[in-house]
Image (cartoon, rainbow, N blue to C red):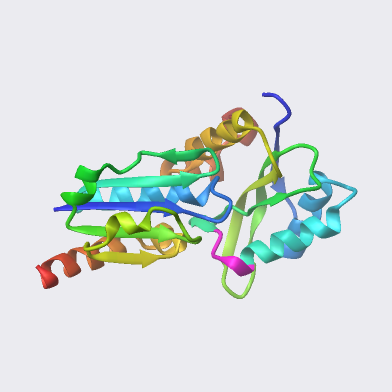
Amino acid sequence: MGDLRKIVYSDCEFDSREAVYEFLSEQISNDFNSEIFKLFLEREYIGNIKIFEQTILPHFEFEKLKNSSIFILRLKNSIIEWSDRLRNIKLLICIALKKEESLETKKKIVNIVESLSNDEKIKNLLQCDLKEELV
Amino acid sequence: MKIVGVAACTVGIAHTYIAQEKIEAAAQKAGFEVKIETKRTIGIENELTYEDIKNADIVILAIDVKISGEERFIGKKIVKVPTEVAIKSPNKLIAKLSDLIKKEG
């Protein structure tokens, strides 16, 4: 799939939004993790990222990324107090998009998002063996 | 009754599609004809035609950004909401549109 990275983390043990975002920021880019961490928080400030029960879809474009990435991260236990606006979060579908990404890769990302974006699929992702289930 | 609209979010890669899908599913469930155009990072999809707009009873704009082509809807009843409203409460949104269609005739 070209230079698009797809990474799955199942049953992660984090106890706060900040811990999750710190981890993901480091996975996306060790060189720019603090900037990416801020982007995660800014995206939440702009608008509600919840897409289904227990599920959020944080995503952003960042000019310093060398590759676009999709991360699926499922927590072992829901984070009840995720933020002032969000509660009981267990599944993250995170998209980090390289600026000026190719149309071909963007279409691949869109296809993946579409394939994940319905109630039944999300229910399955919350319960299944993630690595077998995904993309 | 027929609903047409546009969905568009900031990055245009994720919430746009989900908003489209939620609006379409809720509208069909309520017995409406529906067509939602998406403006995404990969371009415009499911583009509304002149006939689509002409025959629509109401226009829903589920958008987080300013969009081009809004002038196409001049003269129609328009409801504008952020994508999160369409994603979070699609059935309530469709009920509101239905009420507006009935109220304003």
Question: Is residue B32 at all visible to an observer of this figure?
Answer: no
What is the x, y in percent for residue A59?
63, 51
Number of marks drawn: 0
Q: Front-most of A86 and B9?
A: B9
What is the x, y in percent for residue A65?
79, 44
In the figure, is residue A93 to the left or right of B96?
right
Going 57% across and 72% down the picture, which residue do you hit? A85
Q: Reply above or below: A132 against B68.
A: above
Going 73% across and 49% down the picture, which residue do you hit? A12
Question: What main secondary structure does the magenta stretch of the protein show?
Answer: loop
Q: Which residue range is magenta in the image?
A: A45-49
In the figure, is residue B22 to the left or right of A31?
left
Q: Quadrant of the C terminus of chain B?
A: bottom left
- Asked whether residue A44 is drawn in magenta, I would say no
Corner quadrant of residue A109? top right
Going 27% across and 42% down the picture, which residue do you hit? B49
What is the x, y in percent for residue B97?
23, 64
Q: Front-most of A4 and A85?
A: A4
